[in-house]
Amino acid sequence: MKIIMKPVILFLLLSLTLLMGCTGPKPAKILMAGDSTMADKPLSKQLVDSLTGESTEEPFLERGWGQLLPEMISNMGRVLNFARNGRSTRTFVEEGLWGELYDQIAPGDVVIIQFGHNDGVITKRSYTNPAQFRLNFVAFVNEVNARGAYPILCTPVARRKFDEKGVLQPTHGVYPDIIRSVATQEKVPLIDMEVLTSKWLQDAGMEGSKQFFHKFPPGVSKLYPEGLDDNTHFNEQGAREVSRMFVDAVKKQNVEPLTHLLK
């Protein structure tokens, strides 16, 4: 018996075949774990007038370097930034953020991990002692590897802290060296963001480096009427420069599979 298909059915079958044939592989995920220096930030914040109760949206200009990374990724990759303000290796796990990230990992994905700003401050709730910090990084690497994905470790970016002679001062204690040693021990790529950003800030100098940070003189921003002197968090210009440093280092070291996801 000869089967004759109705034109509508034939059209639908042909369309489905063409659609399936044109659908390429899903973009590889680039997942990011870290603190405020890496995190996505809102583009504005709500400000309420204490007298009138009137609410306005004011521009918020702080940026994490992970927020600018998508500009440098091709359509073969997709950035998922799980970094959050104030987190350390310990609180990132305890608050379930690592679990959320881990559930998203698929074979072939890349996981970029940068901590140290909050782990090392003993007065903060996020403080993590050096021994636990090391164990946390080893666990991150092992769990990413177990998923068939690729960990990339980063030392924390430098703070803008100069002495009276204009020499940039290290502020992260033993924590960057712990990350370096874990990368060596576990044989995983390391992007030494502390070294890269320290050179960048030192070259820019005490005055020139101010342009990269989230700073305001009094009376410029309604969010900070008394001004803001932030030497830790970047503005968009600074975050873009730091993201570019990361990408350039990845290319220089030929860190696969991330290299082929870059523009």
Image (cartoon, rainbow, N blue to C red):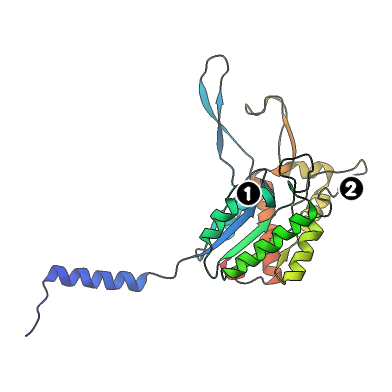
Is residue 215 shown above or below 80?
A: above
In this view of the protein, can residue 263 be seen by the observer? Answer: no
Quadrant in the rendering for residue 183: bottom right
Quickly name the residue at label 2: 167
**Circle 1: residue type:** Glu
Quadrant in the rendering for residue 261: bottom right
Query: In front: 165, or 176?
Result: 176
Q: SS for tag 1?
A: helix
Residue 64 lies, in percent from the top left, at 64, 47
Is residue 33 shown above or below 49?
A: below
Residue 82 lies, in percent from the top left, at 58, 52
Q: Which residue shows up at 75% across the image and 65% down it?
A: 182
Query: In front: 149, or 215?
Result: 149
Question: Could you tell which of marks 1 and 2 lies nearer the N-terminus?
Answer: 1
Residue 259 lies, in percent from the top left, at 62, 69
Q: Which residue shows up at 28% across the image and 73% down it?
A: 17
| Farthest left residue in view | 1
Q: Which residue shows up at 62% across the image and 46% down it?
A: 84
Which labelled disc corresponds to residue 94? 1
In this view of the protein, can residue 232 be seen by the observer? Answer: yes
| Farthest top residue in view | 51
Left or right of 197 in this view: 32: left
Query: In front: 94, or 197?
Result: 94
Quadrant in the rendering for residue 11: bottom left
Query: In front: 164, or 207?
Result: 164
